[in-house]
Image: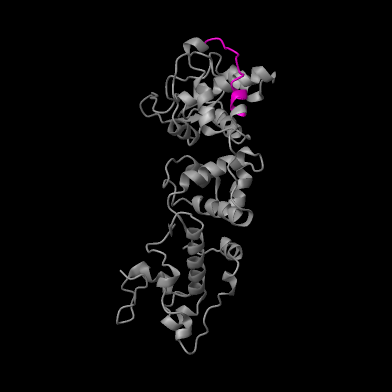
Amino acid sequence: MSYYPTEAEDGTDRMGDMLAWRRDANGKLMSSAEYYASPQYQQKLKYAALDQELISRGLAPTVPITGNHSMPSSDSLPPPASHFADVAAPSTSSLKRKSDTFAANEDSDDEHYYFPADQCDAVRRKLRNLMATGEFTQGKLCEKLGVSSKSYRTFMGMNGKTKGLNTATYGPAYRYFQKQEMTQGPVPKKRVKKADEEAENSISIRLDGEDTISVPVFDSCDEVRKKIEAHLRMPNVSNAGFRREITKTYPEAKAIQSKVLNDFLNKTGPSAGNTSSVFYAAYVYFEKMRLRDGNVKSKHRVEMEKRHPSGFDTKRRNEGRYYTCMEGQKISVTEDKFGVSHVHRY
């Protein structure tokens, strides 16, 4: 099917929504000459140029975030407006500086802005790293991106390269980080030095219950995730090195794969991931660091000890539990930030 469908002989829109791009602000179907002189066509030229720029930088090919047709390359676009005697050709002067082109598109309200289809996990990781710096609260970050907190939480709760592609958060977040990279350059990867990794091995403290994998846990899953994300942002700390260190909290050799760590980090909720080996091992690891450095307990830790005197449950998943009620009653279950379930019957 052609990217640019045509109207039926009687002038009606036989393609349905496929002709939406050929309509002006009042919904009137534009002629070819009118369309090639319109802002929509000039915007598509800019998008095509940006598409080629992203590919030239080694990024993934782009696909539309919305809509039901594909973005053409600049070579496959229809004839320019100069083919029509009464229409001026669109200017390409703004394409000289690619970063300017991106900035011009960044605030566009055009629904056909194009993004890579397989970068959802990468964007989630960048968002978590940004939150770990303390530069933004979740509310401020949502305001910066122009998305709702609900949309943000939905996107962050997904897992997979293409999961969340059509959420309202993926596009603005990808655009935010892409603009940063195009104007400031990619963040260089820091090489992990062997000496620094060996320094982490200095934690020789043993906790009660460590030999039987029964150390009481007094942190929620969300709190442990925050600590992991902040720790991974430290200089000379790698994902693989961190996984090797936390596996030492088990009495026998136990490998924690990268997928297991990523699956845990991609969850959201105080009890989401409570049975993961990462949750238990990371808590023990950070507790050893706290004792080694002589740090006091946080307010969250103190409150967790009150709410969970025997430690947070790491054996049974909190989701999927059954609750009973009397005939005719309704029931709802909520969870506070400490992972305590509250059952409401009415």
- Image location (x, y in percent) of residue 281: 51, 22
Image quadrant in which the C terminus is located: top left
* Number of numbered discs on residues: 0
Where is 26 relative to 267, above or below?
below
Q: Residue furthest front?
A: 194
State the image coordinates of residue 17 (x, y, percent, origin top left).
37, 67
Residues 159 and 307: in front is 159
Chain part drawn in magenta: 196-209
Q: Front-most of 15 and 74? A: 74
Is residue 262 depicted above or below 311 in this figure? Answer: below
Q: Is residue 137 magenta?
A: no
Image quadrant holding the N terminus, namely bottom left
Q: Work out whether residue 340 can be spotted.
A: no
Q: Is residue 235 above or below residue 248?
A: below
Question: What residue sits 42% from the left and 21% below the top?
Answer: 316
User: Which residue: 59% across, 70% down?
Assistant: 96
297 horizontally vs 269: left or right: right
Q: How is the image coloured?
A: one colour
> Residue 118: x, y in percent?
43, 49
Residue 66, percent across and down?
Answer: 43, 59
Any part of residue 40 in sight: yes
The residue lying furthest to the bottom in this view is: 85
Characterize the magenta stretch by its predominant secondary structure: loop
The image quadrant of residue 77 is bottom left
- Tell me if residue 8 comes above or below residue 233 in the rendering: below
